[in-house]
Amino acid sequence: MNDVVNLPRPWSERQRETLRDFLRHAAQRAQQEVEIQTTFVQQDQAIDKEFREVRQKLDHAFHAARQRAVTEFETRQAEALSS
């Protein structure tokens, strides 16, 4: 008879296999954490840059509009006083 008997693996072999799996998963997790952190920093920097650019445009637009309003006010005030 050539029947192979499926004996359970020894406990120590299963422990070693489990430890190898655990270490492999820990290494994968560490690598993924680095990738996540890198992606987060890159996205944060991009968002911050966009925010600063939009804010600068809004500041310029506000100051330009304010200057136009002041100039218009002063012109009308001068016209009213000269009449």
Image (cartoon, grey):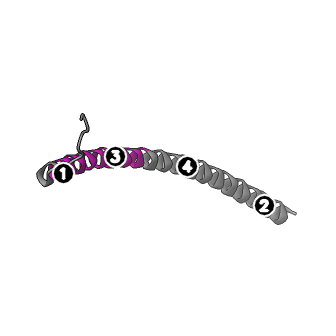
| Type of secondary structure dominating the magenta stretch | helix
Q: Which mark, by number, is residue 56?
A: 4
**C-alpha gap between disc 1 and disc 3:** 27 Å
Residue holding disc 3: 32
Q: Amino acid at mark 1?
A: Arg
Check residue 25 for magenta coloring: yes
Q: Nearer the viewer, mark 2 or mark 4?
A: 4
Query: Which residue is nearer to you in this view: 38 or 65?
Result: 38
Residue extending farthest right? 83
**Residue depicted at x 59% and y 53%:** 59
Are there few (<14), some (14-19), or many (20+) residues within 10 Å of tag 1?
Answer: few
Against 29, is 69 above or below?
A: below
Q: Nearer the viewer, mark 1 or mark 2?
A: 1
Q: Position of residue 72 (x, y in %)?
A: 76, 57
In which quadrant of the rendered image does the N terminus lie?
top left
**C-alpha gap between disc 2 and disc 3:** 68 Å
Q: Is residue 60 left or right of residue 8?
A: right
Dot 1 falls on a residue whose secondary structure is helix
Check residue 79 for magenta coloring: no
Residue range corresponding to the magenta coloring: 14-42
* Discs 1, 4 touching: Cβ within 8 Å: no
**C-alpha gap between disc 3 and disc 4:** 36 Å
Q: Amino acid at mark 4?
A: Gln
* Discs 1, 3 touching: Cβ within 8 Å: no
Q: Is residue 83 left or right of residue 61?
A: right
Query: Which residue is nearer to you in this view: 76 or 7?
Result: 7
Q: Nearer the viewer, mark 1 or mark 3?
A: 1
Query: Which residue is nearer to you in this view: 74 or 58?
Result: 58
